[in-house]
Amino acid sequence: MYVILVYDAAPKRGQKVLKFLRKKLNWVQNSVFEGDITEASFMELKKEIEQLIDKKYDSIIYYVFDSKNYFERGIIGLEKSNLDTII
């Protein structure tokens, strides 16, 4: 499965989420990550993120695709990460 995940968290918790997600997905820019991940790994990721955030104040939004073949990725402006070498 292919996942695009964005988050909005208070700075202290946001740093923890950022550090955690960099181990699991490809960083795209600021609070945006994407990448291939197994369903089991994604379930674990969601559980671990729930422990890092405060659900009253922080937000995680994710989009799940069956594969990378079902969406088109475009960029307008500066590419902040170089995913071409990773994917």
Image (cartoon, rainbow, N blue to C red):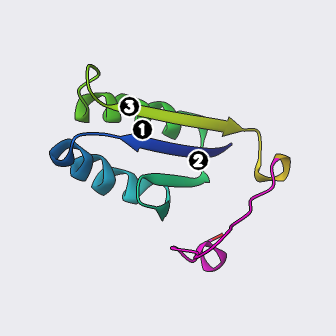
Tell me the kind of residue under disc 1: Leu
Alpha carbon distance from label 1 to label 2: 10 Å
Of residues 73 and 50, the one drawn nearer to the viewer in this rendering: 73
Compared with 29, 39 (above or below) is: above
Give the CA separation, mark 3 to mark 2.
21 Å
Quadrant in which residue 35 is drawn = bottom right
Report the residue marked by disc 2. Answer: 37
CB within 8 Å, label 1 to label 2: yes
What's under tag 2, amino acid-wise?
Answer: Ile
> Pointer 3: what residue?
59
Give the residue type at disc 3.
Ser
Determine which quarter of the picture holds residue 84: bottom right
The Cα atoms of the two marked residues, 1 and 3, are separated by 15 Å
Q: Quadrant of the N terminus?
A: top right
> In the rendered structure, which segment of residues is drawn in magenta?
71-86
Does residue 52 show up magenta in the picture? no
At mark 3, the secondary structure is strand
Question: For the residue labelled by badge 1, is the local secondary structure a helix, a strand or a loop?
Answer: helix
Q: Which of the two discs, 1 and 3, sits closer to the camera?
A: 3
Q: Residue at x 26, y 19 (%)?
A: 56
Task: Tell which circle, 1 or 3, labels the residue nearer the N-terminal end.
Answer: 1
**Disc assigned to residue 45:** 1
Q: Magenta: predominant secondary structure element?
A: loop
